[in-house]
Amino acid sequence: MKKLINIPKVILFILLTKFSFAYTGIAYIENAQVNGLVFSWELHFERTDAWPGGLLSDAIGNSAASFDFNNLALINPSLVVEPGGPLDNANYPNVTVQIVSDKCIVDIPFALNTLAGQLPLNVKTKLLSISMTITNTNLTAGLSWDVLNTGFFSNSDSTIIMTLAGGSNTPLPVELTSFTASYKNQSVILSWKTETEVNNYGFTVERRISEGNWNNIGFVEGSGNSNSHKEYSYSDSDVFTGGSKFQYRLKQVDNDGTFEYSDIVEVEVVPNEYELSQNYPNPFNPSTTIRFSLPKETQLKINIYNMLGELVETLAEGSYEAGYHKITFNANNLPSGTYVYRLESSEFVQVKKLVLLK
């Protein structure tokens, strides 16, 4: 949505740089507006004095229009010459805009062309438009004419203060265009894209399982300020956390610490078969992790035995939902040696060895 602002006109004195003829008129900043993360305005000019004419009136150019602006809120000016307008011809191929120090300057190189003669008397004519990238939507544009006294444009003191965002026109700090989750090779791959970014410090990746609590599992650095398409990804390989329904969201954090949450994406991670994995690490001291996979909700028991077949500890017992699970076995009170862990249920039984080395 565009936000239009009425801008006051500015009286300019126009001076030929190589001849003594003078010419006056009114310059206008027209259609200043906020559109997403872009602030733009147009430069118009109206002749108010008749031109003396003749060959000398062809000498126009070597001129500049200079603007002050809020350089904490606006960067990267770009310029478009009005198609079919006075500057849109072969005599003016290099009209440019740039930031010099803290000024935004439009430069019109010297050219032998009757620019003034092309402008009708007492008629407002659009010369060009300027756009700048918004980097801080909490500030104002602070746009004003700078007293430059150079050629075609000079001597203006009107100041334009306008809010760069407000109400429904406030752009989000980051325009997130997609956020997806997929499961592959025992990892959940998160992918997201942004179209624009303003003061984007980065993304905290949060996860919850089976409607549990949200937990921070990682961070991906942002691109700061960007008007171009960016792609990000994060791999969650810790799927042995119990449950099968994994939900993810992004906490987008600005440089000043403010943040916004993305929508939630969900992926269901269900193994195809029962499996008891080898403990890790192995050998271990004094604790190790035992992982197992269940294709459906299962009543099971995991026991630890010594090599004589004596029960050392019941590590797990009860009903576990479908998904990937892990349990920590702490053998701090046991002597070094080889032990056996056994998972048994009504549909699946498997045994593996583990080695405690102190």
Image (cartoon, rainbow, N blue to C red):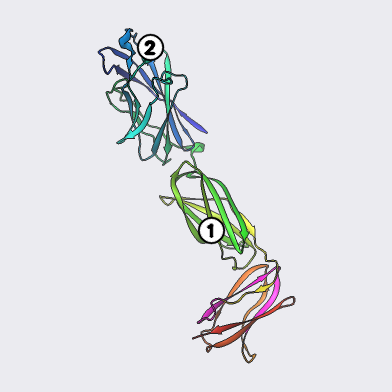
Image coordinates of residue 41 in percent, x first then y, are: 42, 28
Between disc 2 and disc 1, the foreground one is: 2
Disc 2 marks which amino acid? Gly
Q: Of label 2 and label 1, which has the lower sequence position?
A: 2
| Image: 50 above or below 17 | above
Question: As displayed, is residue 74 above or below residue 92?
Answer: below
Q: Which residues are magenta?
A: 280-304
Res 200 visible: no
Residue sitting farthest toward the left: 20
Instruction: Classify 217 as above or below 43.
Output: below
Give the quadrant of residue 158.
top left
Query: Is 339 placed left or right of 321 in the picture?
Result: left
Residue type at numbered disc 1: Glu
Tell me the residue that label 1 is attached to. 206
Residue marked by disc 2: 117
Name the residue rendered at 36%, 15% in the picture: 113
